[in-house]
Image: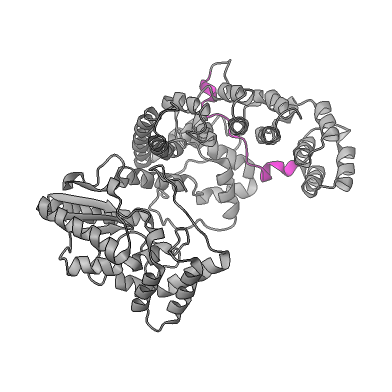
Amino acid sequence: MPKKSGENRPYAYRNFRDEVAAVALALAARPVLEGRMDRSGRASFGNRLGGVHSSDRLFLDWRSSWGQFEGAARDAGRRYRHYVKTDVRKFYPHIRRGQLIDALAGILPRDPIFLALRSLLWADGPNLAAGPTISGCLANVYLASLDEELLNAWNLRGRYFRYVDDMYLFGGNRRELLGVFRRLRARLWEHYGLPTHHGKAEVGRSASALNGPDSPASWVGLSEDFDRIARTLYHVPPEFLSLYARHPARTLRAYTQGLRAAGLFVSTDWLAQQFLSLRGRHPPRDAWDGFFHLRFPRLNIESPYGAARSWGASLLRQNPDFARAVGRLRAKLTAGFRAAAKRIPYSSRADDRRRKHAIFMLRFYAIRLSMFDCVPVSGFFQKFLDHPWALEPSVSANALLSDPNAVNRFLEALMSRRALLVRVRAAWALGELGAIRAIPALWRAAHPGFPLLIRLASLEAILRIDRYHTLNPSAVFAAARAEKIPAVRKYLYIILGQIRDPRVRPLLQHRAASERDFFARRAALFALHAPTRLAAHLAPPSRHAAASLLPSRTRVL
């Protein structure tokens, strides 16, 4: 797995049965392990196991644990003038299996859980593998004796903090602090076999300990705010569940259009899954401190497009705190994205490590910004369609959905000679926008002369747009008869089921009986017996939220 420094991080995974057994063992040993970790005070914060009575997750949420770590470090920074930061180079591969087993034996003596963990570790290899779920917990066990030694024997209580392999030391005297730092590096190497990363060591004033440009403190808060808003929008309002049970397609269409009119662009596929998974049940509790208390205006499913703008304005007006939070987050993400986009080196002579780090930061901001109105920075996303190595085409396509000229941009990308994934995402975006005038181009892209992925994406976009009167029935009928690829025939059968033509039913009856491909045969049966239920099984189209504001030459009809 690539790291933001440009290096690759090796990962390993157990088979499913062993992984379930390892997690069960960690849950059983959780009270003993956690009690041992904090016996001399709280110094380790990363990869901490959840509370004794918590059964919903193995580890504490990383945002919560980082917040606790940052709070403790900032308190120490106010009391001491200087700080030193270091981390272990290739932490997990350097953990010695035999020494880790000895540490476990000291915490869990004569315990069946220890015997089971020991057998798992012996099967994994000579070192601790990064990737398995409990590796983070075992890494904390490996360094538990070091934490206790630093807090007690070295008298660093309140001055030493560790987050996984990142270690912070605080002190009032710079020379004394550097001496402690050198002793710590020697101790890590001689007794634990852990080399420190010389290039990442930092020494400076405590006021800047957690405020560097690449410090997690500069973007963890943004990630937490984004998750609160995203989980709120993908949380199904209870008052909409009964409406969805009666009118699934129109409810989803009205909800997504209203959110998009408010400048919030959510995935219709995810919303459809949420509605379907909660059918007949109440939504879960607000475990993430989201805005689940929002007041939602009444949906107008009879006119989802015409009422979208007023619905979105009412949503923001009735929830001013939510509107302010969205505005602040969007402004911060936009500023970060602008700065990251300007740091991308396009020259082939640029340093590869510098490029990878810039791309890492760019993707962090772009993925989160694509959920909001991205018109001010649409030019950057349009540029990255020509550079898919810098930003995935799916992220650029999501962000450009808010551009008033999005239909023109995606039509040009679909028919261009750009990368295959760019053209596939362009076809998806046209279906997501519900652009009726894009149907002729999508039907042309479904021609056998185009790559298979583009053909499939174009046909799915036509189904999303859900306006079949613009298609030529004879052309669809001829294509379904002559098509040789089963995956394409599946889409053509569903489209045929929506077209009124006397030749369609005999063809579907014949193909439902003679089709060899299982999925194509099921599609023919579905189109033959339940054509009107199509909208309940497919995500509805999401016509552009700014359609009424567009000029006639770019307007989504």
Task: Judge whether 539 appears above or below 51 on screen.
Answer: above
Whether residue 542 is in magenta: the answer is yes
Where is residue 10? Give x, y as percent: 46, 53
Task: Judge whether 162 appears above or below 104 on screen.
Answer: above
The picture quadrant where one finds residue 425 is top right
Considering every residue shown, the one lying at the far left of the view is 173
Where is residue 257? Give x, y as percent: 54, 35
Considering every residue shown, the one lying at the far front of the view is 190
Q: Nearer the viewer, residue 249 or 511?
A: 511
Q: Nearer the viewer, residue 260 or 314?
A: 260
Task: Report the label total.
Answer: 0
Whether residue 89 is in magenta: the answer is no
Q: Residue at x 86, y 34 (%)?
A: 481
Residue 96 left/right relative to 244 = left
Q: Is residue 300 visible?
A: no
Q: Nearer the viewer, residue 233 or 192?
A: 192
Residue 183 left/right relative to 228 = left
Magenta residues, start to end:
532-550
Q: Nearer the viewer, residue 195 or 4?
A: 195
Task: Judge whether 552 appears above or below 245 on screen.
Answer: above
Q: Residue at x 57, y 64 (%)?
A: 16
Q: Residue at x 75, y 28 (%)?
A: 447
Colour approach in the figure: one colour
Residue 394 left/right relative to 500 = left
Quarter the C terminus occupies: top right
Q: Is residue 386 visible?
A: yes
Where is residue 468? Give x, y as percent: 73, 30
